[in-house]
Amino acid sequence: MNDKPVIMQNDLPSLQFRLPFRTEEGNKGSFGRCVIVGGSANYVGAPRFAAESAEETLALLGEAAMRSGAGTTVLAVPDFLAEALYPVLRYSALFPLPSADGNILFEEKKAAELAKKATSFAIGMGMADGDAESYVRFLLNNTDCRLVLDADGLKCADRIADFKGRAVLTPHTGEFAAMTGIPADEVKGNAAELCRRYAAEHSCVLLLKGHESYISDGREVWCNRTGNSRLSKGGSGDVLSGIIGGLLAWDVPLLLAARTGAYVLGRSAEFSRTNALSHLPDDIMSTLPLAFDELQGVMRL
C-alpha cells in the first residue's frame, strides 16, 4: 500500500451505462427505501435537501411521476422539527425521533422500527451532537443496510474501525483532517494516497471532497473533476449525500454509487443556468435529471 496509486478519471466514458438496469415492471418496493437521519435545533434545512435529492434525482429517464430513484424515502428528524417540516415535504415520509437538548437521541426500539424496510441510510446532515455513532453501530451490527456518513455523522468515524464494506464516507478536507488528525495541508498534498489508505484500513468507500475529489474503495482510486463555483454554497454536500443514499437504496454498488454521486452533482452544477452568485442547492434539483440522462445516453429533443 506504499506504492503510488494509479489515479483513474471519473468521467462520462467511465460511468456511462454502468448503473443497473431498471425494468418497466418495477414498483416502489423494487427500488428500496432510503432513510435520512439528521437535523437538530440549530440545523433545520440540511436533511430536507438530502431527502429531496434521494427521491427526485435518480429517475434514470428524467422526469417520472414522483421523480424518485429510491422507491421511497423517510426523513428521520428530532421530534420537535416534525411539525415545521410537514408543510415542505412532498414525497418523503416523516419519522420523529426522540431528542434531548436539541439533538437526536438513540433508542434501539425506534432504530429497529426505522430500519425495518430500509435498504440505505444517510446519516449526519445537520445532526450537531446527535447520537450518530449509536445509529451507525446498530445498523452495521443488526441490519444489511448500506450507509452514507457526512457532516456531523463523520464525527464518530475514528471510533469505528470496520465499516464492513457497507459505508460511504464523504468528508471534505477539513473534516478528513479532523477524522484522522492529519494536518489539512498534508491532506491536500497527498489526497489520493490518503483516501485509498483510509478506505482500505476501515473497509469503506471514501469520497474526499474538494475542487478535485478522490474516491476509493481501498484498491481503485478515481478523481472527479466535474463541478464549478455554483457548488460553493452550504447544502451542496447534503444533496450529494442524498444522491448517494438514493443510489445505494436500489442496490447500486458502493464505489459506483459514490463515483456516480460525485459526477452527477458536479455535472448538475455545470448544466445549471442560474448564475454562480445566486445559485442555491435547490437549483441542482432541476438539472440532476439532465446529468442522469447523460449517463444513460438519453437524448432530449
Image: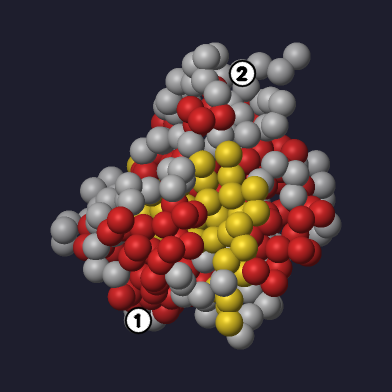
Label 1 secondary element: loop
Label 2 secondary element: loop
Residue highlighted by disc 2: 298
Vertical arrangement, residue 269 with respect to residue 161, above or below: above
- Please indicate whether residue 101 sits to the left or right of residue 176 in the image: right
Q: Nearer the viewer, residue 23 or 234?
A: 23
Distance from Cα at disc 1 to Cα at disc 2: 44 Å
Quadrant assignment, res 66: top right
Q: Nearer the viewer, residue 144 or 231?
A: 144
Whole-percent x, y for residue 159 in the image: 31, 75
Q: Residue at x 51, y 75 (%)?
A: 105
Quadrant assignment, res 237: bottom right
Residue highlighted by disc 1: 181
Q: Residue at x 61, y 57 (%)?
A: 95
The reply to whether residue 171 is in sight is no
Amino acid identity at mark 2: Val
Whole-percent x, y for residue 89 in the image: 74, 50
Q: Residue at x 45, y 70 (%)?
A: 107
Vertical arrangement, residue 189 with respect to residue 263, above or below: below
Whole-percent x, y for residue 179 in the image: 38, 75
* Crowding at mark 2 (Cα within 10 Å: few <14, some 14-19, many 20+): some
The reply to whether residue 169 is in sight is yes
Amino acid identity at mark 1: Gly
* Crowding at mark 1 (Cα within 10 Å: few <14, some 14-19, many 20+): few
- Please indicate whether residue 225 sits to the left or right of residue 59 in the image: left
Vertical arrangement, residue 76 with respect to residue 158, above or below: above
Q: How is the image coloured?
A: secondary structure
Pick the quarter of the image with the N terminus: bottom left
Badge 1 vs badge 2, beta-carbon distance below 8 Å = no
- Please indicate whether residue 260 sits to the left or right of residue 81 in the image: left
